[in-house]
Amino acid sequence: MSGINSGSGPRIDVQQVGDALLGKWKQERRESRRLAEDPRLHTIPGQPMAEHRERVLGQLGILVEEGAIQRAYPAGLGGGDNHGGNIAAFQELVLADPSLQIKSGVQWGLFGAAILHLGTREHHERWLPDVISLALPGAFAMTEIGHGSDVASIGTTATYDPDTEEFEIHTPFAGAWKEFLGNAALHGQAAVVFAQLITRGVNHGVHAFFVPIRTPGGEMLPGVGSEDDGVKGGLNGIDNGRLHFTRVRIPRENLLNRYGDVAPDGTYSSAIESPGRRFFTMIGTLVQGRVSLDGSAVRAMQAALAIAIRYGSERRQFPGASGRETVLLDYGQHQRRLIPRLAQTYAMAFADERLLTVFDEVFSGARDTEENREDLETLAAALKPLSTWAALDTLQEAREACGGAGFMAKNRLVGLRADLDIYVTFEGDNNVLLQLVGKRLLTDYAEQFRGADRAALLRAAASQLGGRVSRFGLHQLGQSIADLGQVARSVESMRSPESQRALLTDRVQTMISEIALALRDAAKGVPKDDKRARATANEEVFNAQQHKLIEAARAHGELLQWEAFTETLERIEDPGSRQVLTWLRDLFGLGLIERHATWYLVSGRISGQRVEAVTAYIDRLIARLRPHALDLVDAFGLTPELLRAEIATGIEEERQDDARAYVEAQVEAGTWPVHEKELRKRGAAAVA
Amino acid sequence: MSGINSGSGPRIDVQQVGDALLGKWKQERRESRRLAEDPRLHTIPGQPMAEHRERVLGQLGILVEEGAIQRAYPAGLGGGDNHGGNIAAFQELVLADPSLQIKSGVQWGLFGAAILHLGTREHHERWLPDVISLALPGAFAMTEIGHGSDVASIGTTATYDPDTEEFEIHTPFAGAWKEFLGNAALHGQAAVVFAQLITRGVNHGVHAFFVPIRTPGGEMLPGVGSEDDGVKGGLNGIDNGRLHFTRVRIPRENLLNRYGDVAPDGTYSSAIESPGRRFFTMIGTLVQGRVSLDGSAVRAMQAALAIAIRYGSERRQFPGASGRETVLLDYGQHQRRLIPRLAQTYAMAFADERLLTVFDEVFSGARDTEENREDLETLAAALKPLSTWAALDTLQEAREACGGAGFMAKNRLVGLRADLDIYVTFEGDNNVLLQLVGKRLLTDYAEQFRGADRAALLRAAASQLGGRVSRFGLHQLGQSIADLGQVARSVESMRSPESQRALLTDRVQTMISEIALALRDAAKGVPKDDKRARATANEEVFNAQQHKLIEAARAHGELLQWEAFTETLERIEDPGSRQVLTWLRDLFGLGLIERHATWYLVSGRISGQRVEAVTAYIDRLIARLRPHALDLVDAFGLTPELLRAEIATGIEEERQDDARAYVEAQVEAGTWPVHEKELRKRGAAAVA
């Protein structure tokens, strides 16, 4: 493969590293990539919105024809019962056109998946064949303009009428309009509508209903209104829009009744007694969207770095001491901009593979326990925010590293960034998701000390020994970190994976225990019977800790990424690959410690001298990795048809070779004009 | 004005603070804002590129009609000789449509300004009237696809032929195609072309030439080729394109000869002897682009925060202890996201005003010394990167803080972000500009120690006493920081402006002195006569310091911003405004110290305890400023016609009031269904 690595040092085996990146669902990913290479599925930059929307609808048809979307559906309906493979394949589609990806996600991952997971056999048989074949395009009508993150508080109602055995779907006020829904403005003929289920005067909370909204000819059905969201910051191939309902009647059987049902006489029943748990069980099926976005973000990062590192390896600017102009990637700052992001991208790719594995275990039924579902949800909530933010950051840094060329649509970076922008707030706002993770960490922490008194908590917070913060199944924080003192004393040992793990783990644990302590004292002094005052006090203290809690959740996600990287590394057999990837993992791990150095210093974990040593070692790692940068992006396996960026085709090197050849020919022919500067130097030399 | 601040605490006088923000060129800014409110000048989201380009060309005509662009031109040509006012007015246009802004910048700030500043009277009289009236649209052909930041190395040649008294403009290879030029793809009829001036076999370096490229009817002139850059990440109302020249002949008089001329016989002459200084003098006229972008970025940040803070003050999500849903801006994390950025925006606005003042002094001739020109250039190079990056960051955070609504084009944030993306790499790549600042700081530093030995340098680096790093005229780093020990001992004193200044100054000085020391030792041990080896050694060491140098330059820019904020504060008379802005300044200053806490800790400047105290105080400042957030964005004076964001119109509050009224009416009528959760609670209570 390419790469300017010379000499006898280690090299990566691009094939082997590439396989590790493709992971367990290599086959599905490859199939999906072949599809994503098809020009019929590609974005056309600048295509007007209306045409782009039609094009993407047509592309969904191509996905059906190519058998690309059936994997997750039951075998009985022509599906593959392949949950992990389905998401893996879906993730790759981001390189065709994110609009195509997300619109297919709306149709089959949200609308279809809601019928599959929230409905029962009759629903599946009735609607899924048409959903799969795209004969029935649909919307997923959960979010309202008034309620996004807080789904439990949506305003749309579904009131049961035992006389006609119908539900009446109704939008009581403007804030309850369903909003930002793909397929709602134009193409959807039905919607899975989330609404408060009311029967016999009782609100049983949010449930999902199948509601026809449009004729196949595009006419709105009576009582259903739609508005177009118009132009967005990206994903303009999707017809996002609003829906509202004025006393629209649907048959009782249109309630997707897997987790809650209404008998003809209006009696409500559910196998899940607690309304809260019932709600979260229903909402839990949404996790696949987060899993999907996590890996899609990784793919976009890989593309960004493949483009910027290729360009940075060819582009030269400003004359160097060598007599030639210096290659951008040989500049210290350019390396600092791109190589740590390369390490991060690897970590996130391996972490996504872990997430996908857990997802598959749960959704395939292989390990579908309540605990695993909870773990899956927390894991997705930890990883999706970090990767989607990192994708925007990496796309932007890559775009800037390519200068003006990076701003041209033909070099892909700006289009991907615009489309992926919304990934950080949809399928769960990133900050809200991290808060969810933080709360889970707090719960786990509290469970260790159930019944323990303040003194025990304090001791634990002070010593940070033992205990496990989480039972994610992915890592055991039982890892003793009593050796931290030793870590801090030795620079050498900070490079070891054990100390990286200990430092990263310690940070999560300590932050969580400090927050727990603050929360525990919140209502101190407030009379026990004044519930309102206690709630207010708790809320205030929690609010004061919110920023820190989100930072702790982020630290937890980073630890998970680091661990996924480390575990994958252990399975790499080729020694050269293992060596180079170990440097990359160390760069990722020490990079996290450098980024959070203030915390480590303030909490007395490491000394200022050690921080300087970490930075110096990071500089050395970056220099050591620089000759492998091209190999490391080659291992992503992104073909020219997937990248489709002019500056990643070698065009810059060609131009530079031409320019060089021109100058050399002129010099040889004696027609190259001498520069005034040179003349002046010669003059000065002659005088001297 | 609006604002939910209650009670008897200080309030800002929105008018007075608004005046301070508008600054010296208030009148020009107001005129320009009135223009920017005109719907004829507004972006139409999603408008296809071709139509958008035509629209923007038409808008330039409107600017001419409205007398909006003549300010900078000489009175003799119908201009206003008003340099500061011209840039101030230009900055405001970003709120109409950044495409309109930048295309007008190309026409009058680059193409026209090059003729004005690099040409002489004859050129002015011949071309400027048509440039000003837009009868002659033109391109500024400096950048080539092969050379962007390194203008001195461009490949285009202008070879003088004494026989015909013509220059031959020629593009010798593909890398020398002029690239990314506004007005090049469609509308430009001429271009100011930068090329290596060759006469009598000598290359006198880069000079500018006036070259006709197209007929008024749009036909390319013989030998001139043009290609369209097509779709970009933003600014799609501008017809960026490439130009190339095949032995195109222009009269000798088309050389813009203010700084260098060629006699009919081919003799070259220049009042500036050094080719290096001559080049930088010519290029120096470009500084106005950087000044323009700095303030434009600030305006975009102001708009972003006005939108997000208004929305965040109305939007509610998740029920709180109060019984109502909590306002987003009452969440700790939401405050942490927006309020420090508000402080930063104020600092950057005041810093831009300083920059504009220095610019006006130089360009009006009031204080046009070489030293001031250098200072202006360094100041612009320090501020433009920080503000343009901050604009992208702030627009993005605002977009995310508004969730899905932030992604809708009708709420402005995504469009502004897409358009402003390129601001960080054009008119000087931000990293390259910061390196320029860093080098200037190093030069200033070295001058203090001219002739000093290594021991003296070491002593200085160790003690960090006295000395001035820069003579920017904006600040004197002579400020003694001997009292730092005291600062570190007292939390109270860290809040004082003196200690904030000392800490920020110390960081710049120390970083620069450390880099200087590293560079000084670079070629140690390399034989003095081996120039190549010494150059290589120097290059390697410089490269290893590059990242740190850029960080030092950033720190310098931050200090300049802090000082501008502090100086402006001293002129605010209203006590309430002064109090609130002092909190805001402290938030900015301590925020910088918190952000760079690792450095302060590692270098032993402050203790871990003090860092914790800084963070705690920042939390308190944010809470204290929260009730003033709306007032502080009101002071930006951005009318609804300038903001044009649906979510900044109060629509969210209306929707929430409607929803609340609906629920209250239902409750009152007894038709509000009881929630199952409530029933279960009651049931549990009844059992107990």
Image (tube, coloured by chain):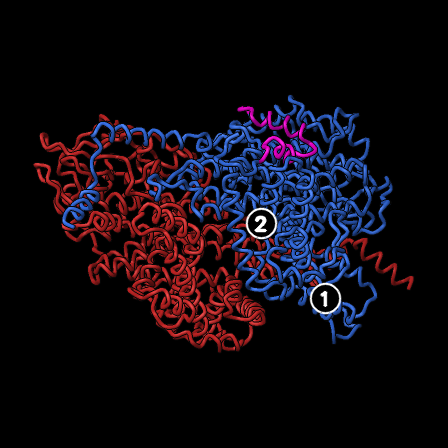
Chain colours: A blue, B red
Above or below: residue B458 compared with residue A314: below
Type of amino acid under label 1: Ala
Q: Magenta part of the protein: which range?
A: A12-40
Q: Chain of mark 1?
A: A
Residue A246, can we see it? Answer: no
Query: Label 1 neighbourhood size at 10 Å, few (<14), some (14-19), many (20+)?
Result: some
Disc number at residue B403? 2
Residue at 39% of width from left, 52% of height from top?
Answer: B542
Residue at 22% of width from left, 27% of height from top?
Answer: A669
Which of the 4 quarters of the picture holds residue B318?
A: bottom right
Q: Main secondary structure of the magenta part?
A: helix
Q: Which residue is mark 1?
A: A461
Q: Are marks 1 and 2 on the same chain?
A: no
Question: In the image shown, does B37 or B368 lie closer to the viewer?
Answer: B368
> How far apart are the two marked residues, 1 and 2, measured between alpha carbons?
36 Å
Which of the 4 quarters of the picture holds residue A443?
A: bottom right
- Answer with left or right where residue B385 lies relative to residue A149: left
- Answer with left or right where residue B261 lies relative to residue B496: left
Residue A204, can we see it? Answer: yes
